[in-house]
Amino acid sequence: MPAYTHGPAHEQAMTKAGVLIEALPWLKRFRNRIIVVKFGGNAMINDELKRAFVQDMVYLRLAGVRPVIVHGGGPQITKELKIRGIESEFRAGYRVTTEESIDVVRDVLTGQVGAELVDLINEHGDLANGIAGHEHSLFTGERMIKEIEGERIDFGLVGNVTEVDPQRVLHVLAADRIPVVSTLAQDGGDIDDDGSGLLNVNADSAAAALAIALDAAKLVILTDVSGLYSDWPKRESLVSIINTDELRELLPSLESGMIPKMTACLAAVDAGVPKAAIIDGRAPHSILLEVFTQDGIGTEVVPA
Ligand SMILES: Nc1ncnc2c1ncn2[C@@H]1O[C@H](COP(=O)(O)OP(=O)(O)O)[C@@H](O)[C@H]1O
Ligand SMILES: CC(=O)N[C@@H](CCC(=O)OP(=O)(O)O)C(=O)O
C-alpha cells in the first residue's frame, strides 16, 4: 500500500504528527524563556530515569527553551551519612545539619550528584556546566529557624536563601548551555567556627529562589509522587490545580517532603513566576508532557 493512502500506518503517522503539533503553541510560548527544573533525589532512583531526564533537558534546550536544572540529592546524602556512621534527622521535611554533616552534603551534591548529571548531559554534546550554589555568590543565606506548633526549631546549618546573584547562571545560559546548580549557600551572617560558612539549602527552596531571580516562565519540580494529594496518605484525591490563596490555607496541614515543595511553589508564584508544577519524576519524560501539552500533569500552582 502506498504511504499516502489511509490505513493503520497512516493513522499512526497522523497520531504522531498530532503529538508534535500539539507542542507548537508551547514551543512558541517558551521559546527563549527560562524554565527552572528541580530534579529531586527521589526522582533519580535509577540510571534509566536519569538518562530520560537528561534527554528531556537536551530536548528542551535544542527546542529553543532555556532549562536551568537545580538538583536535589537527599537520599544520596542520607546514604553517604550512613556509610560514615552519621545519623540523619529530618524535621518538617528539612535535614537538621551539623558541622559534621555539612561537608558530606557539599561533597555529595556537588561532587557526586551534580557532577554525574553534567557528565550525562555532556554525552549528548558539550552542553552543561555545573555551578555550586555557594560559589560565584549565587546563593547567600541565613540560618533557618521555624516555629512549628509553638516549638522553636533550630535546624543547625540549614539556610533560607536571602540573596541570589544569578550572573554565573546567566553567563552559562548566554553561552547556550545548561546550568546544573547544587543548593548550598554561603552564610551571609556569621561565619561559623571552621570559617567555611556553608549552609545546606533544601533544593525545592533554592529552585524557587532561582526561578524568581531569573524571572523564569515556569518552575517544575520532579519528585516521586504524582503530585499533591489533598487526602494524604490515602492518595485518592490528586490536586491538579490550586491557586496561591488555596495553597496558603492548605500549607499548615501538609506533612514532611510536601512542606518544602509547596512552600517553594507558593513563594515562586507569589513573587511573579506565572506557574509552578509538581510532577512525577518516576514516569520517564514526564517533563515533556508537562511543558508541551495542553493539560500538563501533576499539580499546578497558579496565581489567585
Ligand atoms: N499531601 C501529600 N501529597 C503527596 N506527597 C506527600 C504529601 N505529604 C507528604 N508527602 C510525601 O512527600 C514526598 C516527596 O518529598 P521528598 O521525599 O522530599 O521528595 P524529593 O526527594 O523529590 O524532594 C512523597 O514521596 C510523599 O511521601
Ligand atoms: C535542608 C535540606 O533538607 N537539604 C536537603 C538538600 C538536598 C535536597 O533537597 O534533596 P531532595 O530534593 O532530593 O530532597 C538535604 O540535606 O537532604
Image (cartoon, grey):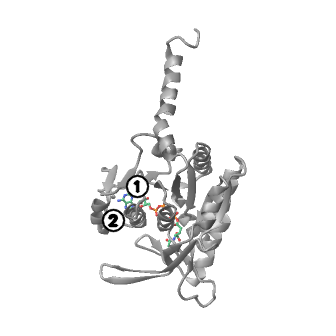
Task: Residue type at mark 1: give it.
Answer: Pro
Q: What residue lies at 63% left-to-right and 77% top-to-bottom?
A: 103
Q: What residue lies at 54% left-to-right and 60% top-to-bottom?
A: 41
300 vs 156: above or below:
above
Task: Residue type at mark 2: give it.
Answer: Leu
Where is residue 38 drawn, in percent x and y? Answer: 52, 58
- Report which residue position mark 1 lands on: 274
302 vs 156: above or below:
above
In front here: 78 or 240?
Answer: 240
Query: Which residue reaches farthest bottom?
Result: 193
Where is residue 233 drawn, in percent x and y? Answer: 33, 58
- Mark 1 residue element: loop
Check residue 93 in the rendering and tell me which mark sits there, or answer none. Answer: none
Can you say which quadrant of the picture contains the C terminus? bottom left
Disc 2 CB within 8 Å of nearest ligand 1 atom: yes
Where is residue 43 drawn, in percent x and y? Answer: 52, 55
Check residue 254 in the rendering and tell me which mark sits there, or answer none. Answer: 2
Disc 1 CB within 8 Å of nearest ligand 1 atom: no
Dot 2 crowding, Cα within 10 Å, few <14, some 14–19, many 20+: some
- Mark 2 residue element: loop
Q: What residue lies at 53% left-to-right and 54% top-to-bottom?
A: 34
State the image quarter where residue 262 is shown. Answer: bottom left
247 vs 163: above or below:
above
Where is residue 139 drawn, in percent x and y? Answer: 55, 73
Q: How many numbered marks, from 0 up?
A: 2
Q: CA distance from mark 1 to mark 2?
A: 23 Å
Tell me if I can see residue 292 in this picture. no
Disc 1 + disc 2, Cβ < 8 Å: no
**Could you tell which of marks 1 and 2 lies nearer the N-terminus?**
2
